[in-house]
Image (cartoon, rainbow, N blue to C red):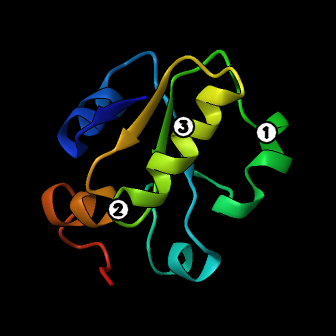
Amino acid sequence: MRILSVRELKARLDAPAGRPQLLDVREPWEVHLCMIADSLHIPMDQVPARLPELDRSRQTVVICHHGIRSSHVARLLEYYGFTEVFNLTGGIDAWAREIDPGMTTY
């Protein structure tokens, strides 16, 4: 598992090609407050059962509130054979503070 800063993620999302798949593993109430556009929401405890929804051929950036839960899920994905897995360091909180200051924080 590799880590990715919010600034690095923003640059990848702004690039014309190679957009990574964003996997938000927070709880539904958290996603209701805020999320990065085009993220796939699968709560952490549902990820093993919903692996077929993920594209193994794409880079996957795992997102949570601060980066702890996403770190666990990123390791799980690697265990299941995903090779291009990144943990968003600082999570959605860092995204809101550094990239999208208008985003709701909690």
Q: Residue 68, percent across and down?
A: 40, 58
User: Which residue is painted at 23% across and 73% down in the image?
Assistant: 102
**Residue found at x 29% / y 72%:** 103
**Where's residue 24, x and y in %?**
54, 55
Under mark 3, the amino acid is: Arg
In this rendering, does residue 4 appear at all? Answer: yes
**Is 24 rendered above or below residue 105?**
above
- C-alpha span from label 1 to label 2: 22 Å
* Helix, strand or loop under label 1: helix
Residue designated by label 2? 92
Task: Point out the tag, 2 or 3, that comes first from the N-terminus.
Answer: 3
Residue 82 image offset from top left, x and y in percent: 63, 22
Mark 3 = which residue?
75
Q: Secondary structure at mark 3?
A: helix
The kind of residue on which mark 1 rests is Leu
- Residue at the limit of the structure toward the left, as seen here: 98
Identify residue for label 1: 51
Q: Is residue 44 above or below residue 3?
A: below
Q: Quadrant of the C terminus?
A: bottom left
First reached walking from the N terminus: tag 1 or tag 2: 1
> Looking at the image, is mark 1 or mark 3 nearer the viewer?
3
Q: Is residue 88 left or right of residue 99?
A: right
Which residue sits at x=32%, y=22%?
A: 15
Tell me if label 2 and label 3 are in contact, CB under 8 Å: no
Of residue 66 and residue 7, the one placed in the foreground of this image is 66
- Circle 2: is it few (<14), some (14-19), or many (20+) Cα within 10 Å? many
Q: Label 1 to label 3, Cα distance in Å?
A: 13 Å
Q: Is residue 22 visible?
A: no
Horizontal and vertical percent position of residue 13:
36, 33
Kindly identify the residue that appears in the image at 73 percent across and 51 percent down. Answer: 47
